[in-house]
Image (cartoon, rainbow, N blue to C red):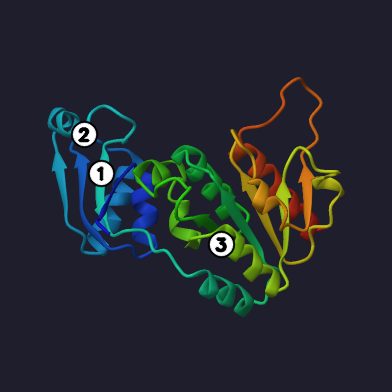
Amino acid sequence: MKELTIYGFRPVIEAIENNQTIDKVWLVKSDKSRLFKELIIKLKNNNISYSLVPRVAFQRKYGVKNHQGVVAKISPIEIIPIEKMIQNTESKKTTALYLLLDGITDPRNFGAILRSANATSVNGVIISSSSSSPINEVVVKTSSGAIFNVPISKVNNLKDAIYLLKENKVEVLGLDQAGNKTIYDSDLLNPLALLIGSEEKGISKGILKLINQKVKIPMTGNVESLNVSVATSIALFEVIRQRNL
């Protein structure tokens, strides 16, 4: 797998702090912000090669998109086997919390979900190798570097992942507006995997048959659904709320 290009101060700083292999960093020469100074210190302390580039030359090469004047080449994001993810979780002696993503193909949604997953100490995110967003610079940027702190596993078939989770006494709840119970009325205290479907198609019918229960987020307005990353965040923080009562 080829190296990854990432943009922005926070993603690059998070990559350094999480011991990602960084080939080189390029920064706009005229930037003297607090984050610029923080990044320079971290680059020097970790002996990471960097270059200061005039703003005009930087924009000529990388455009004027939201890169904050920072670009880095890093090693690919580590993908771990689901068996190792479960084993690592069990060794922590905490109540398991996983995310299963079914058909989340938009990198911005994927990145935002990873950011919420990191904020709620999710033990791992499980995605399909055939129907998921690629792990690219947009995902890294949108996650604000959270991707370096959340274990990710790719599986050929989400059904097999669900079977394996159930074998390890993990309950699988599907977030679906057709659910009979709301997320707030559900018991989220036991080892749990939240299954999230795409905004367009929802959770695949074949996978829905395997879950323990469908739960929904109550809404009182006129919209039929929420953005998938927003809905995921609401569900995750309800898990944390219940577990910290």
The residue at the point 79 percent across, 30 percent down is 219
CB contact under 8 Å: marks 1 and 2:
yes
Q: Is residue 100 visible?
A: yes
Q: Amino acid at mark 3?
A: Gly
- Residue wearing tag 3: 124
User: Residue under circle 1?
Assistant: 71
Q: CA distance from mark 2 to mark 3?
A: 33 Å
Residue at left 67%, top 77%?
A: 93
Q: Which comes sooner in the sequence, label 2 or label 3? A: 2
Closer to the N terminus: mark 3 or mark 1? 1
Marks 1 and 2, the one that precedes in the sequence: 2
Q: Quadrant of the C terminus?
A: bottom right
Mark linked to residue 62: 2
Question: Amino acid under label 1?
Answer: Val
Pick out the residue farthest to the bottom: 91
Asked if the residue under mark 3 is in contact with the one under mark 2, i.e. CB atoms within 8 Å, the reply is: no
Determine which quarter of the picture holds residue 32: top left
Viewer-nearest residue: 38 or 172: 172
The secondary structure type at the circle numbered 1 is strand
